Amino acid sequence: MTGNAANDPQNEQNPLLERGVLPPFDRILPEHVVPAVRHILKQEGERFTALEALPAGSEWELVAGLQAIDYEIHRTWGPVGHLLGVRNSPELREAYESVQSEVVDFSLRLGQSEQVHAALQRIRNDSGWSDLSPARQRLIALRLKDAQHSGVGLPEEQRARFNEIARDSSKLYTEFSNHVLDATKAFTLDLTDPGDLEGLPDSAKALAAQSYAQAHPDQQPPATAEAGPWRVTLDLPAYFPFMQHAKKREIREKLHRAYITRASSGDTDNQELIVKILKYRKEQAGLLGFGSWAELSLDSKMADSVADVERLQTELLEASLPAARTELGELEELAAKLGHSGRLQAWDIAFYAERLREERFQFTDEELRAYFPMPRVLDGLFALVQQLFGIRVRAADGEAPIWNDDVRYFVIEEPANTENGSAGDPESWQPIASFYLDPYSRPADKRGGAWMGDCIGRRRTAPGPQGLELPVAYLICNGSPPVGDRPSLLSFREVETLFHEFGHGLQHMLTRVDDADVAGSNGVEWDAVELPSQFMENWCYHRPTLMGMTAHVESGEPMPDDLFERVRDSRSFRAAWQMLRQLNFGLIDMALHHSFDPAGDQSVFELQAEMEERTALIDRLPEDRFLCSFTHIFAGGYSAGYYSYKWAEVLSADAFGAFEEALEKVAAVEAGEGAPSGDSLPNTVVEIGRRFRETVLAQGGSRHPMDVFVDFRGRRPTTEALLRHSGLKSAA
Ligand code: ZN
């Protein structure tokens, strides 16, 4: 550390300024945030001033300096953002908010530097450009685009306005997301009549009783699963089982209405924020010379244009609408048989869908849950990636400071000298990455949903093993926590989520790129980011993989064959309905950010209603305010990018298709010979696994995603595999 601030004894002991191998999460407190961030901004600001003054000819020194700045900021600011998601508190929020605009200012200063922009352009225009590695070309091109999107070259007055908006927007995003968190937390429904829980599985009753007991720690006798009282919240693991199982329709309706009106009134009202955010985005895009925020968004994505996105969405919409109508008809039929009269409402869908699933496939989510104790699932997942990618995952609990006792820590290893395509030395394994796993929901202070975060990215600072910093990932899930002394039992959906996030983690951790800018998921176009994650989900339907991670919590038995078959067959159950739902979100997102005028007469909710005419098959509630909790597009990175899930699913399904083809060939040969190959994956499949590892996972953002995909698949992607997996097209 340099500069005066480092001599300040307070900073010497500030854990956010330490640069050990891992952040000291056990010691980071809200009071460390402000001094650490101010210190690092000052220090890196001085470094930046020096970089701007470098003479022509030192362009690569400048690039290295910029990367060092990014690194330092990320090492201090990254853990703060992370803790905001997993250990939220009023003190931490306040600390975060008081320096947030300074961080935004700093990144604007970096992005808008004329000197840096000129230096990057000199590299771009130099005769040596074509000799640069693809990774280096990409990182320069990406930095140039970033600068353009940050407003470099804007005249003074416009730039001032641009910056004002950027600062304000980041505050609005944080506010939006806090409102959702607070509104979710503010709603509780306490039940004392066992009749209100009729239909619910024991695990949901136990969770509701536990939730009540936590809120009333002194009550005697304490709440129990059988006798209550019970507390339902809008936290997904608590909320969803009620929507699927509660026989009492009024309870479902109450919960549904609360859910879709979150953050739409009182202290946590997001309605005005939405309009402000949309106005800002439109204005910002205009300042940069784009027709809409959507056009700006697509300028750095794999999709070429708004029309390109519209084309895919329409194709999928046309494929799924008729099938979704059939699916709804089946639900109506069953509901009538079970005594329901009148039209099905939004709060009936999950309930009757679950009944239909039980009738058709003869299993319940609960029954499946018993086969997936968390430790067993992890073993199965790790065994799969060991075979596919030649890596080993070692539990390293206790080797890293953690932010909560639930959190686990793992190290990924591969045989020494594996790089460059050689098989490596099986006798000697070396670490190449590590990750934290924060598996369970903690509604009191942890954000819902699941995500992978970048703790530390891979980067090289000097030749040799000492000069290589290894990547570290955060894998955050919100699975059902252990109840009492039972291990956590995952629902099948939670297993898929774990595989999903692990897929993101693999791209972050198995990268072989040494330039931090384009290592791992860095630099990967947003609409291609979900490729490795959704790819991994497919393995949950691969028989040996799935069987390998099941062990019934009481008997220890693996899942019976016929149950597996029913699970596999249920994969496309109501897939058209689900696809329609995703398309609905994507269409609304695109319309809000492209054609919609936030200053016009139409409200966002009217636009939502208009868009839903294309996709909705049941009555919508006029008071539906789901946009008020749509954090993906108003507080996350998915604005004018929600379509990315489907875009990337085309890629991930098609990529998995390569494995399916190989597995089918092996199966055909074995059927001929009558000798199945046993538990391990056949060699042809392993070869494809290695190719996936060396292309998609290893190259990440260092090349254009289409080039990487074609290298893996041998051709451009098609929608065939996605439609087939969704039951919308039969196998050719
Ligand atoms: Zn994802």
Image (tube, rainbow, N blue to C red):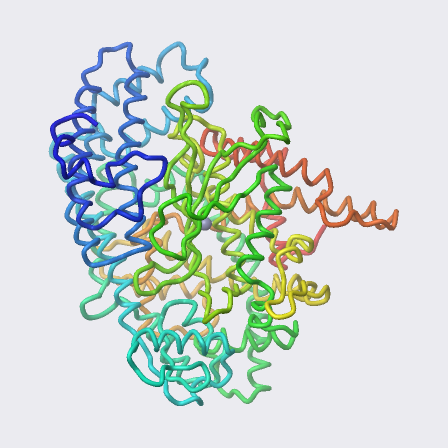
Q: Does residue 162 appear anywhere in the picture?
A: no
Q: Horizontally, is 447 left or right of 533 in the view?
A: left
- Locate residue 352, reporting x and y percent: 53, 78
Q: Nearer the viewer, residue 506 or 404?
A: 404
Q: Quadrant of residue 519?
A: top left
Q: Horizontally, is 215 left or right of 586 in the view?
A: left
Query: In the rendered view, would you say 250 is above or below 36?
Result: below
Q: Nearer the viewer, residue 236 or 332?
A: 236
- Locate residue 182, reporting x and y percent: 26, 65
Query: In the rendered view, would you say 30 is above or below 271?
Result: above
Query: In the rendered view, would you say 713 is above or below 669?
Result: above
- Locate residue 72, reporting x and y percent: 27, 32
The quarter of the rendered structure image containing the N terminus is: top left
Q: Nearer the viewer, residue 580 or 664?
A: 664
Q: Horizontally, is 386 left or right of 219 in the view?
A: right
Q: Horizontally, is 324 left or right of 100 in the view?
A: right
Q: Nearer the viewer, residue 490 or 176?
A: 490
Query: In the rendered view, would you say 126 is above or below 453?
Result: above
